[in-house]
Image: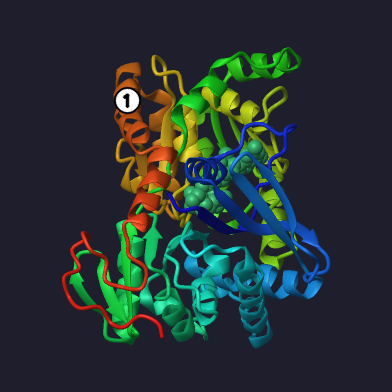
Amino acid sequence: MSRLVVVSNRISIPDDKKTGAGGLTVGVLGALKAAGGLWFGWSGDIGDPDAPLKTTHRGNIHWASFQLSEQDYQQYYCEFSNAVLWPAFHYRLDLVKYDRQSWEGYSRVNARLAEQLLPLLEPDDILWIHDYHLLPFASELRKRGVQNRIGFFLHIPFPAPDIFTALPPFATLLDQLCDYDLLGFQTEGDRQSFLDTLNGQTTLYSPAAGSHQAYGKTFRTAVYPIGISPGEIARQAAGPLPAKLAQLKAELARVKNIFSVERLDYSKGLPERFAAFESLLEKYPEHHGQIRYTQIAPTSRGDVQAYQDIRHQLETEAGRINGKYGQLGWTPLYYLNQHFDRKLLMKVFRYADVGLVTPLRDGMNLVAKEYLAAQDPANPGVLILSRFAGAAQELGSALLVNPYDRDEMALAMHKALKMPLAERIARHSEAMEVLLKNDIDHWQKRFIADLRGLEPGVAKPGMGNKVAPFPRRA
Ligand code: GDG
């Protein structure tokens, strides 16, 4: 079997001291273990970008990591990836900070990474590239003569055409994306947005479901909703809280708990969620003294201005809500701007009567899935989920809400806090059926099988593409 080469912005290098990796790392490692191969990505260090790659290996898996210069870090990572693509793809054009230097930096880094990867590639390797940092990566490899099969998975939403085409270099990005052989999306809506955008810009020919030709290139699109490892999470969640957290356990047991955790990011709808919690306290005073909402939100991308702004906003709001509704001996809202150990989080999920996951936009949202998997099936909590998270497509048994409607969210919280056991069990078991069927292993296996099923540079036999292909690359 040919080797798998994975490329992602951040690389997860094995560390014996760290346990409990999440989502993407588990999926990628599963795929790499099966075939053997290489994981190439940024170490997270700032330094000399031309320094030799740092390499390590375990069994049949190799890791190769690069550094970014300070200028690359700013232009490629902070600016174009996280202050242009991330906000735009999450429908926040108001937060886009575009300038030509950042686009040039993004393009320059993608070109250099392709150059660095080139000598490590073998002719029959298959390549799996991840996420919005690397939209032009296949194109840069093709320019250098690489004919291997290259797949791409977009972890975040693909926006509607009017949003995408507001990005100044949209036409180049679209053309570059078509250099992938297989483009994977979280939901059908994302896939459709990509195709609608292409259709509006060029002649898109789709001779069979999922098979396309545009800009003289042949490629496929498909939907691969990312999953979790439900068994592993259930095991982590089931054990008792560590003895040193006995006090926390006693506190959690005294009230009904609403709980959530996410990276501190404006796409996650945290201010809106705080407002909804305030609405719950305002409209349903019966819960005063009886509930506690804990929001964990570790800082993420702290060098980007919009992330600093939302951090200040949340600190202010948490203080204001507690000041207004708190009582001696009762603090309604716990806001913790800290990173927590993963196993501890899964255990705390299990104590949560309500999982509150209400992003304004989200490619998938693994927290929603992790919360469900951590529940006691005999006495599960209730998931409240934004209809704008990709996960809502699979988790129709959750209480689906519009995160822009604070009163609807407050009502959902009230309903969840009061929900009878039989209804909680029914909703939970329906959701678990989906999560068990489409777990992280299934996700990576489907993607890799589809990618392996393609012939490089020609129409893809066996996948319904019966027309003569465009000549692919000279
Ligand atoms: C992107 C897309 C898509 C959070 N805080 C802590 C912590 N976490 C873990 C969660 C979860 C992961 O981080 C976050 O994953 P999400 O899916 O919720 O969101 P993004 O980070 O935005 O991920 C998203 C995902 O890619 C995968 O394709 O679902 O839509 O935006 O696993 O548990 N983990 C620990 N401490 C924390 O404080 N240990």
Mark 1 residue element: helix
Please name whichever residue, 445 or 393, is drawn nearer the observer in this view of the structure.
Answer: 445
Q: Is residue 235 above or below residue 56?
A: above
Please name whichever residue, 94 or 325, is drawn nearer the observer in this view of the structure.
Answer: 94
Image location of residue 365, percent across then percent down: 47, 47
Residue 171 visible (yes or no): yes
Q: Is residue 16 above or below residue 142?
A: above
- Could you tell me which quadrant the C terminus lies in? bottom left
Quarter location, residue 289? top right
Image location of residue 285, percent across then percent down: 51, 30
Please name whichever residue, 463 or 341, is drawn nearer the observer in this view of the structure.
Answer: 463
160 to the left or right of 345: left
Quarter location, residue 413? top left
| Residue in the picture at 71% in, 67% down | 305
Residue 301 visible (yes or no): no
Image location of residue 429, percent across then percent down: 32, 25
| Residue in the picture at 52% in, 39% down | 282
Image location of residue 416, percent across then percent down: 40, 30
295 to the left or right of 417: right
Q: Amino acid at mark 1?
A: Ser
| Residue in the picture at 41% in, 42% down | 385
Q: Is residue 167 above or below residue 422?
A: below
Badge 1, how many Cα within 10 Å: few under 14, some, many 20+?
Answer: some
| Residue in the picture at 48% in, 45% down | 35
How is the model colour-coded?
rainbow
Residue pointed to by mark 1: 429
